Amino acid sequence: QVQLVESGGGLVQPGGSLRLSCKASTALFNINTMGWYRQAPGRQRELVGSITVAGGTYYADSVKGRFAISRDFSLNTMYLQMNSVEFEDTAVYYCRGWARARYDYWGQGTQVTVSS
């Protein structure tokens, strides 16, 4: 079973930046697709962005141009760089690694709170 551990959440002011990390217990090239999801209170969990093992990325319209996903294969870690954060970005952020019908791994989540 692959373990995913998020870190880096916290309190940030509007317009500020934060970087989340997701460390995998396996080499990243063993995971077909990795992504970041978030869930705000009273709302459904939503996909923020994803990256395939080949490097193809997807971003939700709400974060496009502000957030960026990157990886460090030597550290088995995926990152979410969050810039120009807004109040609406407040949520628990989850890391996910999956391949359809084969495996589906989730981290425990890290809280991001945007507040002045």
Image: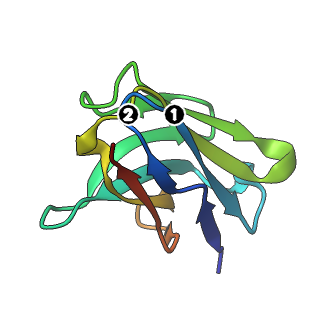
Picture quadrant of residue 100: bottom left
Task: Give the secondary structure at mark 1.
Answer: loop
Q: What residue do we see at 62% from left, 40% from top?
A: 53
Binning the other alpha carbons within 10 Å of mark 2 as few (below 14), some (14 to 19) or many (20 upward) gives many
Q: Which residue, as the protein is rendered here, is positioned at the far left?
A: 42
In this rendering, the answer to whether 33 lies above or below 55 is: below
Q: Which residue bears the numbered disc 2? A: 85
Badge 2 amino acid? Val
Query: Which quadrant is home to the C terminus?
Result: top left
Please state which of residues 116 and 98 is positioned toward the viewer in this rendering. 116
Kind of residue at badge 1: Ser
Q: In which quarter of the image is residue 2?
A: bottom right
Give percent across and percent down for residue 82: 48, 35
Q: Residue 115: image x %, image y %?
A: 33, 47
Q: Is residue 90 left or right of residue 82?
A: left
Q: Which of marks 2 and 1 is nearer the N terminus?
A: 1
Q: How far, Cα to Cα, is label 2 from label 1?
A: 6 Å
* Residue that lies at the very extreme toward the top in this rendered image: 65
* Spot occupied by residue 71 in the image (x, y as percentages of width and height): 69, 39
Q: Residue furthest bottom?
A: 1
The residue nearer to you, when weighing 76 against 112, is 112
- Circle 1 residues within 10 Å: few <14, some 14–19, many ≥20: some
Residue that numbered label 1 is attached to? 17
Depicted 19 relative to depicted 110: above or below? above
Q: Which residue lies furthest to the right in this view?
A: 74
Q: Nearer the viewer, residue 60 or 92?
A: 92
CB atoms at circles 2 and 1 under 8 Å apart? yes
- Residue at (61% x, 61% y) in the render: 7
Residue 50 shown left or right of residue 5 in the figure = left
Please state if 29 lies on the left or on the right of 9 as rendered. right
Look at the numbered disc 2 and give the secondary structure of its residue. loop
Query: Which residue corresponds to the image point at 41% horizontal and 24% vertical from the top-left?
Result: 66
